[in-house]
Image (spheres, rainbow, N blue to C red):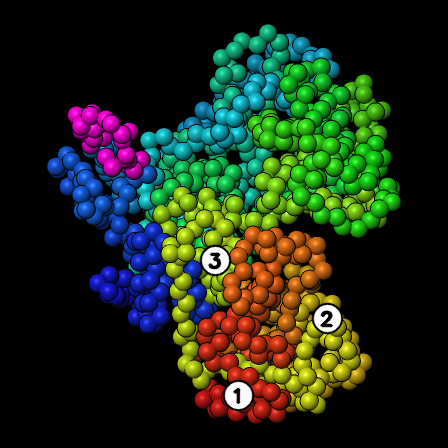
Amino acid sequence: MANKTQEVGGIHFPFPFTPYSIQKDFMAELYQVLEAGKIGIFESPTGTGKSLSLICGALSWLRDFEQKKHQEEARLLETGTIPLSDGTEQPPSLSSSCKETPDTPRPAGEPDWVTQFVQKKEERDLVDRLKEEQVRRKKREERLQQIRHNAQLKYAARRARQEEEEMERLLRLSREMLAAGAEAEPREQLACGEEELVLAEYESDEEKGAASGVDEDEDDPEEEHVTKIYYCSRTHSQLAQFVREVQRSPFGKDTRLVSLGSRQNLCINEDVKTLGSAQLINDRCMEMQRSKHEKSKAEEEKPKRRRQEHRAACPFYSYEQLHLLRDQVLVGVKDIEQLVALGKEARACPYYGSRFAIPAAQLVVLPYQMLLHAATRRAAGIRLQGQVVLIDEAHNLVDTITGIHSAEVSGAQLCQAHSQLLQYMERYGKRLKAKNLMYIKQLLYLLEKFVTVLGGNIKQNPNTQSLSQTGTELKTINDFLFESQIDNINLFKVRRYCERSMISRKLFGFTERYGTVLAASREQPRLAGFQHFLQSLQPAVTKTPVTPVEEGEAGVPRLASPLMHIESFLAALTTANQDGRVILSRQGSLSQSSLKFLLLNPAVHFAQVVKECRAVVIAGGTMQPVSDFREQLLACAGVEAERVVEFSCGHVIPLENILPLVVCSGPSSQQLEFTYQKRELPQMMDETGRILCNLCTVVPGGVVCFFPSYEYQRQVYAHWDKSGLLARLAVRKKIFQEPKRANQVEQVLMEYSRCIKCCGQAGGTVTGALLLSVVGGKMSEGINFSDNLGRCVVMVGMPYPNIKSPELQEKMAYLDQTLPRGPGQPPPGKALVENLCMKAVNQSIGRAIRHQKDFASIVLLDQRYARPSILGKLPAWIRDRVEVKATFGLAFAAMRKFHREKSVLS
C-alpha cells in the first residue's frame, strides 16, 4: 500500500492512500487536541475511515512529540541547564520520571542562595536522569534491531531453552527418586496436598498499596515508561481489526505496539485454560507464580518432616524467556492471536510477556475493562500519568463504566458461600491464626446478615425457602448498611483482607477437593451431607457426583467460588453514599432473590483517567447526543468546559445517496405514535404491516426493520400471521427474524444474505428479504448491512427504556439533584430517557451506510421523531438531510423515486 503523505496546516500525516477531506480535518483536529492536552469527543460515521484517521493522526503527533523531546534532551545535555519560567515556551514533559522542574514553588522567605542551590541540584539531577534514559533507550533500540536482523539470536534462545528444560526434567526425576526412597511421615488430619488450602498468617491491617502477590513488582524496574498512546475498544474482534489497520498503515513497520488481553485470552498453559472461568484462571495463574517464587525458599529450609506437595510452577513463566518474548513483541505489530502463537513458539507466557513490553511500547491496544477499572490497570502495570488515551466505539461508555463497577449476588450464592466458609473454618480452624479466624467470622456474619435482609434464613436451603415479602426495594448505601446491621464492620479492612489473603481461591480449592480428599477423612459423614447440600444449590438438574479436577471434563468451565462474586459486592459497598444505591430484589424463593449495587456516578471512576492523562479522546461512529458525555462523565469528573473539544464530521457518501424520512401517518391515515398505550392496538399493528408491504414493493434487496423489544416483535409477528399481512409481505420478501440466542445469529445472517443474492440473480416476484430485528439486540450493533443487505432501514416507534424501572427512576432522580438545569431545557432525568432512546436509534440506523458508494433509505415510523428536540439528537449526516412527511403518500413517492433512480445507476 503506497504511502501518500498529506500536509495539513504544516503537519505531515503519512497515509496509505489519498484521504477524504473529512479524514484530513479529523487528523488535524486530533493532533491539536493531543498537543494541547485537551479532552476530545470525536464523531466519524462508519465507513469514513475513522480507524485510519485515529492511527495516522495520533501516531503523527507521537512522532513529532518524540522528535521534539529528543532535540530538547540533546540541548539540555549540551548546555547542562534547563529553561526557567521567563516567558519562554516550556517543552513537553520529557518522561514519566522527569516531570520536576525548577519552577516548583519554594517556601516564602527562603534566601536566594538556597533557591539557587536547590535549582542547580535539580538541573544536575535532571541531566543525570536524561543520560541514564538515553543509555537505556540506546540499549533497547540496539536489542530490537538485533532481533529484527539477526535470526541466529532466535535460534540460540531456543537452544538455551531446550537445554534448560532438559535440566529441569533431570532434576525433577532426581527429586522423585529421592522422595520415593525416603520414609514418609504421615501428616495428622490433613491429606496429601491439602496444606496449600490453609490460609497463611495475616499479619497486618495496614494499607500497603496493591494486593500481595507477583503483580506488585513485575515491571522491569530499569525500564522507563515512554510517552505512549493507549487505544481501547469494546471487544477483542474490534481490537484485532484495529491492529490490522495499524499493520496496513505507513506506521506498521516502525511502531512498537503491544496488544493486551486477559489471562483467559492469552494463557497457553492447557492445564490452566481448562478451568474455563476467568476468575479461576486468574487465581490459578497467580498461585503458580507464587509457587515458583516460594520454591527456592522452601528448598533452602531443611524439612523436619515430609514436605508438602505444592502445585507445580508454570513452565511458561521464565524470566529470561519472558524478556526475550517482550523484545519479540516490540518488533513488528502483532494482534492477540499472533501474540499467542509467538508465545507458544517461544514457550513463554504471552500474558506476562506483553505486560513486560508496556514500558517501552508506543501504542498499547487493550479492552475497555482493563483501562477503565483502577485495580485492573494497576495489576496490568498500566501507568496513565502524562499519557494519551483513545477510547473508540465509545457510544456506550457511560453504561460500560456503570456496568464494570456494579455488582449483583443472589441468595443462592450467599448461602453457598456461607456454607463453604463455615465448613472451611471447622476443618482448618485449629491451624489458623487469630486474625484469620476473626476475618472469617466477620465474613460469615456479613453473609448471614445479607440473607436476613432479604428475608431468608442462612441455615435453610435457599431453593425451598419462600419469602413472605416480595418486590423490589432500593436503598442508599448507608441505609442498607444500617438495616443489615453491618455498619459497625470496617468493610475497607474486610475487602483488603479478601484481596491479600486470597481467601476465595483457598475456598474454591477446598470445595474442589472435598469430594475425593475429604471423603477418606474421619469427617466423611458430615462432609458428605455438605456435598449433597452444595449440589442442591447448583442450578443444574442432574445429580451426578462431583469429580476431582483430574477426572473432570476439560471442556466444561467450572463455576468460580461464590465468594468471588460477593467480594465484588463488598468492594462496591465502599463507594461513597451519594454515588450508588443498593437494590433488594425479593422474588418467590431466596435462591432467586438478589442484592445488587447500582453505580449512579460513573464519573467518580473516570475522573482518575482524565486527571492523570495528558489527553483523552472519546471517539465513535454515532456519539450523538453528546450531552451524556459532557454532563455525566466530564463535568462530574471535574473537567473544565474549556478543556473539552467536540468534533463531528459528515459522511463520505454524496447527498443523493441517502434518504432519511420521518413518516407521521400510515396508508390509511392512521397517526403513527407507538407509545406503550397505543402500540399494541390492532389498528397500529395493521398500519405497520401495510407500510412495510408498500415499502417492500419499491425497495430492492434487503430491508431491515427494527422493533423496540423482542416481546413487541413477537406480538406484531403473531398478529400479522393471523391477519394475513405476513403472507402479503412474503410475496415480495422472504421473512427472517432475529434469534434470541447469540449462537444462531451467524446462521440467520448467512441465510438472509444468501436469499438476497439469489433473488438478485434469479429475478421474479421475490426481490429480496425482510429481517425483523430488535433495537439493542444482536443485529443493532456490530453488524454491517452494506449494499444490498440493507437498502432500507425501518425504525418502528421510539425505543424508550422502561420508565417504571427502579434503577432508571433512581438514576433520573440522581441526575435531577446533581446536574444543573439549563434555561428552556428539560430536567436532566427526562433528558437521560430521551438520550438513551436516541442512542439506541442512532446505533440501529447506522447499520445501513457502510462505504462511499453505498446508498440506502432510512424510515422513522413515529410522528414524535419530527420534534426539534428529537431531530437534534440524530447524527449530523442524517439530521442535515432528513425530510418530515406528514402523509404516507408523500413518503412513498419519495421512496419510489429514490430507489428507482439508484437502481438504474447501480
Choose the circle earlier in sequence order: 3 or 1. 3
Does the image show residue 469?
yes
Mark 1, residue position: 899
Mark 3, residue position: 630
Residue at x-position 63% and y-position 28%: 490
* x and y, in percent, of residue 29 in the image: 33, 62
Is 104 within the magenta? yes
Identity, as a three-letter code, of the amino acid under mark 1? His
Which of the image's four quarters has the N terminus?
Answer: bottom left
Range covered by the magenta-colored residues: 97-123
445 or 166: nearer the eye? 445
Residue at x-position 20% and y-position 48%: 89
Per the image, label 3 sits on a secondary structure element best described as helix
| Tag 2 and tag 3, C-beta contact below 8 Å | no
CA–CA distance in space, label 2 to label 3? 30 Å
Does the image show residue 547?
no
Mark 2, residue position: 676
| Tag 2 and tag 1, C-beta contact below 8 Å | no
Identity, as a three-letter code, of the amino acid under mark 3? Arg
Residue 461 falls left or right of residue 253: right
Residue at x-position 54% and y-position 9%: 302
Residue at x-position 35% and y-position 65%: 26
Camera-near label (2 vs 1) is: 2
* x and y, in percent, of residue 659 in the image: 51, 83
* x and y, in percent, of residue 809 in the image: 67, 56
170 or 673: nearer the eye? 673
